[in-house]
Image: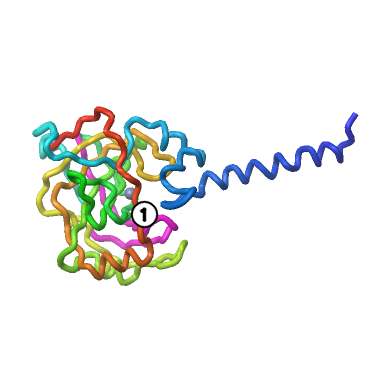
């Protein structure tokens, strides 16, 4: 009959191992042995085994035209107090207003937006310097992400105040009141031509069932603005994933 003390020593390593395993799940990055090729081995099986993963390389010659009516997407974004957070993977903006959109009759609320460099989606094998993701969720938990490509050009005035307050260190935060927060409606490309496909989160756990809507027209940022982001995150993009027979639609 083992003594209680013996049992304790037997159980102790197990108890210590469990939290360690969970902590390992949370640790992923964009390089080395915690980089995108290893996300599946770090407890995120879908990143390896998924068949509808994001991002993708968009072949603009293989789009299914007029599959979605322009009226199927109505975006209502504006300006509201914003908290910007450096979460160690990107800069994430958490708006506090009533930003949202309606897609095919379903209402979505804007949860957050963030940035990747270079762009995660490619257009005919070409990256843009930066890509913005606006993550929306409906009442049933379905996710819809708007992807906006950012090309090198004029300074982006709408993002200037946020950019001068970018938190450089992990867990750093910056609070922007409504007067200096970006107007997310004004920020979006003026031409409302979009590409639609079904994909996944581009970060662990790479969950699928995400509706992607990419603007075909990019917006602009200056070289100095692009460089400012890259000083904090030199490369935070996941490589393009196989299309696996998925259809790409346009409106
Ligand atoms: Zn993203």
For the N terminus, give its image quadrant.
Answer: top right
Q: Position of residue 227 (x, y in %)?
A: 29, 67
Indicate the position of residue 43 as horizontal and vertical percent values: 51, 39
Is residue 105 on the magenta stretch? Answer: no
Give the residue at mark 1: 236
* Chain part drawn in magenta: 78-104
Give the quadrant of residue 55.
top left
Instruction: Please tell me in which quadrant of the rendered image residue 11 appears.
Output: top right
- Residue at image position (20%, 30%) is 247
> In the image shown, does 100 or 144 lie closer to the viewer?
144
Residue 54 visible in rendering:
yes
Q: Classify 79 as above or below 13.
A: below
Q: Position of residue 141 (x, y in %)?
A: 36, 37
Q: Is residue 17 above or below residue 91?
A: above
**Residue count near mark 1 (Cα–Cα under 10 Å), binned few <14, some 14–19, many ≥20:** many
Callout 1: SS: loop
- Give the residue drawn at x 39%, y 37%: 207
- Quadrant of the snapshot with the C terminus: top left
Is residue 138 among the parts visible in the rendering? Answer: no
| Residue found at x 44% / y 58% | 88
Q: Is residue 98 magenta?
A: yes
Question: Does residue 49 appear to the left or right of 178 in the view shown?
Answer: right
Left or right position of 226 against 67: right
């Amino acid at each position: 009959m083992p003594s209680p003390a013996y049992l304790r020593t037997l159980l102790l390593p197990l108890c210590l191992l469990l939290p360690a395993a969970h902590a390992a799940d949370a640790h992923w990055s964009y390089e080395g042995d915690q980089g995108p090729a290893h996300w599946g081995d770090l407890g995120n099986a879908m990143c390896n085994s998924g068949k509808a993963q994001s991002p993708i390389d968009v072949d603009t010659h293989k789009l299914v035209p007029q599959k979605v009516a322009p009226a199927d997407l109505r975006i209502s974004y504006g300006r509201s107090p914003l908290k910007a957070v450096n979460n160690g993977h990107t800069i994430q903006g958490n708006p506090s207003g009533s930003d949202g959109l309606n897609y095919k009759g379903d209402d979505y609320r804007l949860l957050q937006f963030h940035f990747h460099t270079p762009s995660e989606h490619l257009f005919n094998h070409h990256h843009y310097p930066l890509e913005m993701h606006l993550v929306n969720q409906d009442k049933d938990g379905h996710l819809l992400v708007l992807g906006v490509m950012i090309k090198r050009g004029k300074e982006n005035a709408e993002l200037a105040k946020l950019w001068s307050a970018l938190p450089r260190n992990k867990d750093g935060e910056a609070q922007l009141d409504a007067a200096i927060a970006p107007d997310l409606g004004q920020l979006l490309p003026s031409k409302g031509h979009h590409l639609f496909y079904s994909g996944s989160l581009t970060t662990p756990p790479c969950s699928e069932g995400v509706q992607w809507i990419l603007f075909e027209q990019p917006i602009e940022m200056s070289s100095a603005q692009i460089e400012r982001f890259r000083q904090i995150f030199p490369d935070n993009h996941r490589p393009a994933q196989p299309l696996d027979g998925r259809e790409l639609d346009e409106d």
